[in-house]
Each structure stands twice: as C-alpha cells, then as structure tokens.
Image (cartoon, helix red, strand yellow):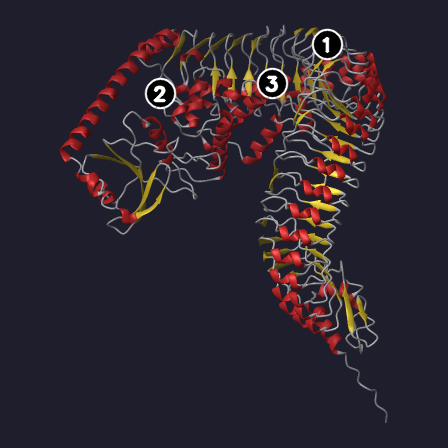
Amino acid sequence: MTTTPVTSLSPDGQALLSLLAATDPYSKSSSSILSTWNPSSQTPCSWQGITCSPQNRVISLSLPNTFLNLSSLPSQLSSLSYLQLLNLSSTNVSGTIPPSFGLFTHLRLLDLSSNSLSGPIPPELSGLISLQFLFLNSNRLSGRIPQQLANLSSLQVLCLQDNILNGSIPSQLGSLVSLQQFRVGGNPYLTGEIPPQLGSLTNLTTFGVAATGLSGVVPPTFGNLINLQTLALYDTEIFGSIPPELGLCSELRNLYLHMNKLTGSIPPQLGKLQKLTSLLLWGNSITGTIPAELSNCTSLVVFDASANDISGEIPGDLGKLVVLEQLHLSDNLLTGLIPWQLSNCTSLTALQLDKNQLSGLIPWQIGNLQYLQSFFLWGNLVSGTIPSSFGNCTELYALDLSRNKLTGSIPEEIFGLKKLSKLLLLGNSLSGGLPRSVSNCQSLVRLRLGENQLSGQIPKEIGQLQNLVFLDLYMNHFSGSLPLQIANITVLELLDVHNNYITGEIPSQLGELVNLEQLDLSRNSFTGEIPWSFGNFSYLNKLILNNNLLTGSIPKSIRNLQKLTLLDLSFNSLSGAIPPEIGYVTSLTISLDLSSNGFTGELPETMSGLTQLQSLDLSRNMLYGRITILGFLTSLTSLNISHNNFSGPIPVTPFFRTLSSNAYVQNLNLCESLDGTTCSSSQIRKNGLRSPKTVALISVILASVTLAVIASWILVARNHKYMMEKSLGTTASSSGVEDFSYPWTFIPFQKLNFTIDNILDCLKDENVIGKGCSGIVYKAEMPNGELIAVKKLWKTKREEDPVDSFAAEIQILGHIRHRNIVKLLGVAGSYGYIAPGKCSRSSDFLAYNLLLKYGYTMNITEKSDVYSYGVVLLEILSGRSAVESQVGDGLHIVEWVKKKMGSFEPAVTVLDSKLHGLPDQMVQEMLQTLGIAMFCVNSSPVERPTMKEVVALLMEVKSPPEEWGKTSQPLIKQSSNQS
C-alpha cells in the first residue's frame, strides 16, 4: 500500500496567508491575482505578485492597485525576513502601520501610498537599514515626522506628502546624504522653519514642501543643492526675500515660489539658471524691478510674477527668451512702454500685462506672435489705436484691452480671426462704427464693447454670430433701430445696449432669445409697446427698460418670467392698470420699479404674493385706492409710493413705522392708523403725510425736548456721583476694592432667582476668570447654586459717552439664542459710566462672530444662520461693525440700514464710502447684494431664504471671472498657475 506524501506551505507562505485572511471575501473572490494564492502549494513562489530567491524565500510582495480592502495590515508579514520589496500602494488599506515593519532589515522599497492609513509613522521604521525608497504619501497619517528616519542612511526617496502630519521638519534629516527626493507637501499642519541643514543634501533633485504651514525664510544653504531640479515651495507662510544663492542651483528646472509672503526683489542671480523652464513667483509681495538678467534663462517656458508689487519697466531683453510660452506680469506696478522686443518671443501663447500702469502704444510688432492665444492688457494707461496687425495672430482666442485710453476704430482685421472667442474693449474712447465684417468672427462668444464712443447703426450682420453669449454695447453713441436679426443668436444670455441713442420699437422677435438672462435696453429712445413675446424669457432674471418712450400697458405675459428678480420700467409713458399677473412673478426679490409712468387704477390684490421683494417704487403715477396689500410685502427694505392718489390707512408693520414721510408725499388721502384698518384721529400725524416740513419741525422740537431731558439726567447723575465720591474720599481706591454701594438699576431679560446684590457680592478678584477689551469677567455662584458669568465693563472718562452703542449691543445680546453664544440674562447699571475702555467698540463682534437677533420664543433653525450671514454681508458692504457709535443713533447695523433706506436716502449711501468710486456696474452688483442681505435679515424668519437660495441669488449677481473686464477686472488667468 503506497501513501501520498503530505505537503505543507512554507513559513513565508503562511505569513502571506495572513494577508489573504485579512482581505474581505468579495475582493478575494473577484481578484485574478489573489485567486492564484493556493494554500496547498509548498511555496508561494508561483503566486502572482510574489517573487522568490533561488532558495524559495519571498523577496518581493507587490500588489499595487489590487483591491484588498484591508482594515489593518497584518503584523505577521514582518516574518518575511528576506523581503526586499513591499508594494501595497492603492490597495484600499486602512488602520495603522505596524511597528513590526521595522524588522524588514533587507527591505529596499516600502510603498504604502494612496491608501487610508492613519496614526503616526512608527519610529521603528528606522530599523530598515537597507531602505532606499519610502512611499507613505496620500494617506491620513498624523503626528510628527520621526527624527529617527535620519538613520536610514541609504534612503534615496522620501515621500510623505498629502497626509495630516504636524510638527516641524526634523533637522536631523539633513544627514540623509543619499536622498534625491524629499516630498512632504500637502501637510497643512506641518509648521516651523525649513531646517538649513537640508542644504547638505547635495544629491537632492526634488524638494517639495508646498501647501504646508511652514514659515521662516528660504534657507540660503539651498544654494548648495547643485543637483536640484524642482523646488516646490508654494502656498506656505514662507517670508523674507528670495535668496540669491538659488542662482547656484545650476540644474534647476522648476522654481515654484508662488502664494507665499515673500518680499524684496527678484535676485538677478536667477539669470544664471540656464536650464530653468518654469519660474512662478505670483501672489507674493515682491518689490523692485524685473532684472534684465532673467533674459539669460534661455530655457524659460513659463514666467509668472503677477499679483506682486513689482515696479519699473518691462525689460526689453526678455525678448531674448525665444522658447517662452507664457509671460504673466499682471497686477503689479509696472510703468513705461510695452517693449516691442517681446515680439521676438515667437513661442508666446499667453501674454498677460493687465492691471499695471503701462503707457504708450501697443507695439504693432505683437502681430508677429503667430502662436499667441491670449493677450490681456486691461486696466493700464495705454493709448493710441488698436494695431491692425492683431489680425496676424491667427491662434488668438481672447483679447482684452479694456480700461485703457485707446482711440480710433476697431480694426476690421480682428474680426477675421477664426478662433477669437472673447473680445473685450470696454472703457476706452474707441470711435467709428461696428463694422459689418463682425459677422466673419463666427467663433465669438463674448463681444463686450461698452463705455466707448462707437456710433452709427448696430449692423444687422451681428445676428450671424451664432455662438455669441454676451453682447455688451452699452454707453456708446449707437443710433438707429435695434436690428431684429439679433433674435437669430439663440444662445445669447446677455444683451446690454443701455445708454445709447437707439430709436424705433423693440423688435418682438427678441422674444425668440429663450436663453436670455439679462436684457438692458434702458436710457435709449425706444417707442411703442413692450412686446408680448417677452413672456418667452423663461430664464430672464433682469429686465431693465427704464428711461425710454415706451407706451401701452404691461403685457400680461409678464407672468411667465418666473426667474425674474429685477424689473425696471421707470421713466416711460406706460399706462393702464398694473396687471394682476405681475403678482405671480414671485421670483421678484431685488427690485420692482414702475415709477414715473402713467399707471392708473388700484394695486392688484395679487401683489401681496411678492413677499420676497426688497425694493418697490410706484411713485409718480396716477394710482389710487388702498395700500393695505403692501403690508404683506414683509421683505421690503425700500418703498416709494409718493405722488399718487392713494387713500386710506397706512399698514401697521415694523417696516412702515420706519418709513420717512417722503415715501408717501402727495397722497393727500393717506392716513396714519393704529390698527391698519381705520384712520387714527391724530390730525398732526395725518397732515405730516402731506408736509415733510411739518414732520421735520415736530421732530426737531421733540428731539430738543428729549436732549434737554437727557442732559438734565446726566448732570444730576454726575453731580450725585461726584458728591458720593467726595463723601467717600479715597477709601475705596486705596483699599483696592471697588465700592458698589451707589444705586443700581437691574434689567433682567427673563425671570431670575437672584438679585443684583447677589451678583455684586461675587465681584471679587478671586472670582475673575478673564479680561477683555471691554471689561472683566467674573464667575458668580448664586444662592441657589447656579453658576453664571458676569461681565463688568471698564469705566471711562467722563467726556466719553457710548450709551447709545451700549444700548444697541444690549438690544442684540438680550435677544440672542444660539448654541455657540452665551445667553444674556440681564443688565445692570449705576450712575457710573460704562465704556469700551481700550477698544474702539463696545463688543467683540467681528465679521466672523455671526450675529443672531432673536426673540425668546423663536427656535434656532437654518434661518438663524441666514440672518447671521445677512449681518455679515451688511458689515462688509457698509464697512461698519454690527454695533458701533459711528453707525449712528446707537443702532445695530440691521436697524441702521433699514432706517437709512426707509428715510428715502439713496441705497448707495449705505455702501462703504471707499467703494463709491468703483465702476457703475460693480456698484450696481453691490447694491443687489445689499438687497440680498436685507432679504436675509427679514424680521420674519419664514420669509427669509434658505442658504441654498441665497447662493442662487448671489450667483445671479456675480459675473463670471472672465466678465470682470466690465467692472475693471481681468479675464481669469489660464494655465500659468499650474504647479
């Protein structure tokens, strides 16, 4: 009888089976690699992913991109004592790195990258004495970089990037003299300075620490890195100047120093880097001039020094860079002429010189750049004419010469460019007509010629531009009729021809532009009626037709404009009743302006549905009847119904109580009301609606009396305090204990189980838990055991009187209910004076300390955060804090804005005065944002938008970045920022 010998798997095979056992069943069965791992084998040497020595010992385990789905790495693998290569990259492994992996004394490569490993890097890995390549990048590893890694004397590649490591880079790593790649970028919590000892790594070819929290300076010792090819040191907190020693790194190809805090000038020594292909310095605070020596970097392909403070002229020597493809110098302080020598950079594809102070003419030689794709020059002082030689730049797709001093006509040659997509010439002094040859440029997507002196008729051939999305011809001298052929541009989204001399009727064919989002025909001489076909604009969000000669009524098809947020028909000759259909356009949120027309009749009941409307102007019409329905418009921040024939009681709502009489003037039969349904008997208030002078006189009298009373109170209070201080002498001050014996007024915001005396007893030094700009915070234990915090504000000089701001702050704090803000239980005061002390405001509210103003019965919901966001928007737009004396009358910012807008002041007065000089279009967008902010702070939470709706509204206001040329902003940079 014969028996079959029993075979058993070798110990190395058993260790590998631990990996197989940890793999989830699905991955095991579906993997063609793991299916070859047969436990019945004598050795694993035939298994896929395994390599053995002649002695059948496993020397390589390589399973990259194999879906193992391991929750942890089995420590049994460490028994593979002859292992030289371990590659488990991209295998979906989680858990920690076993410290036992430090036992692989023969291991030369360890690759665990692109997994979900967490925890620290084990210091035990320093036992891998033969290791040459360590890839732990793209995981979730945390903790510090172990200084013990400096023991890996054979290490050539160290990749730890894209983790969440913290701490600093160990200076001991400077002893890894064999290291060629050092990459720790993408660890945002990595801090400290770059150790100068790393300058000893003379074999280093790649040094990457981008997107970290590293600070300090670029070590001058890096000049010793004679083999360095890539220095990726961007998006950090690095400051100081660029060390000239980098000019000694003769092998350097890529120098990425952008998005840091670098200062000083560009070292001319960088001109020694003849192998340099990419020099990215943008987004720093670099000063000085561009060194002409950079023209010696003959291999340079990309040079981006934009968004700095570089001054002086552009060196003509840069024209020697014949392989240069991208030159980005925008957003600096450059002056002088555009050097014609740049035309010798025959490989240029992108030339961006926008937002500088360049002057003189555009060199005609630019037309020699046959590969040029984008040329941005907006926001300079360039004069003269547009060179016709641009017609030779056959690859050009974006040309932005906006906001300069260009004159003359638009060269017809430009419209012969078959790839031109964006032509922006806004804000110059161009004259002449728009040539009929514009139709040849079929590739045009955006044609923006506003704010010039172009004249003549708009050519009908423009209707052949089938790809045109934006057509801006506003603020020119165009005359004649609007060509109906524009209706053929079916993809058109924006049509703006305001402020011209266009006559005739509005072509009804425009209704075929079903993708239109903004239509502005204002400030022309259009006649006739508003076309019924405008009801086809299902995507339209702004319709602006004011200041024309339009007649007839508002078409009932207006009801179909369900995305309309702004409608301005003011200053026309429209007549008839306001159609009920307008009340169904519930998307109207920004403004409805029907003023200065001939509308008659009563307000349609359906208008009560415009609950999200911010601004309504019906002034100077012939409307009559009651205005009761306006009380339902709970989002209103601005209203003008003056110069009509309205009658009856004024709605009794918080908004109407803040309105100035200017909003009602010349409505002789309107009256004040106590209940909103019947007129009150107060003849004085009623007459006030007729005469703003009467209101002003009464206000002055009341204000004078009020001031007299307040002044008397202050004098009495001060005298009382002085007498008390005189009688007490210096006893309190000398003892260091403050006297609280003078009378106190205590105003609780809810029912409390303690008194002011209980609080005063706790105001002792041993109970101090903090101090701030505005006062001291005490811990106070009440008799019932309740612990509360008490803030005692600093005293101030007698001439300072922040009572109004303090009252406003208390009004806010007393009504806040938010999980992240301590509830204010009450406020107490004496005859003493309370003030912000060393700070400029009486609270610590900043734009990031969100303000939530709520009554006691309201719950915190998503609408709470919307209110907070609205307050932040108001702070940003007005340049004022939520509560400060400069806001006026001690009002918090919401009430201050409502008061200004309710008093019939122009909305622009709310904006920060620094913003008033900006282009009109930008100011208009800020005013629309103001409307959205007021929408967010509506006193009724149910009428506030959700944050999703707020984002949608802001997106409607915000122009795409490439449209910023309309508001003195650049087309977005293309590919120069790649790193």
Image depth: mark 2 or mark 1 in front: 1
Mark 2 and mark 1 lie on one chain; the one further toward the N terminus is: 1
Mark 2 and mark 3 lie on one chain; the one further toward the N terminus is: 2
Using a 10 Å C-alpha cutoff, classify the residue at mark 1 as few (fewer than 14 neighbours), some (14 to 19) or many (20 or more).
Answer: many
Q: In the picture provided, is 114 more to the left or to the right than 54?
A: left
As drawn, 535 above or below 251: above
Q: Position of residue 9 (x, y in %)?
A: 77, 78
Mark 3 and mark 1 lie on one chain; the one further toward the N terminus is: 1
As drawn, 822 above or below 680: below
Tell me the tag on residue 196.
none
For the residues labelled 2 and 3, say whether their Cβ atoms are less than 8 Å apart: no
Q: In the picture provided, is 394 more to the left or to the right than 717?
A: right
For label 2, the SS is loop
Quadrant location of the N terminus in the rendered image: bottom right
Tell me the tag on residue 454.
1
Quadrant housing residue 390 = top right
* Cα distance between the residues tagged 2 and 3: 46 Å
Q: Can you identify the residue that label 2 sits on?
A: 675
Q: Position of residue 431 (x, y in %)?
A: 74, 9
Instruction: Give amino acid for label 2.
Output: Asp
Is residue 974 visible from the viewing direction of this image?
yes
For the residues labelled 3 and 1, say whether their Cβ atoms are less than 8 Å apart: no
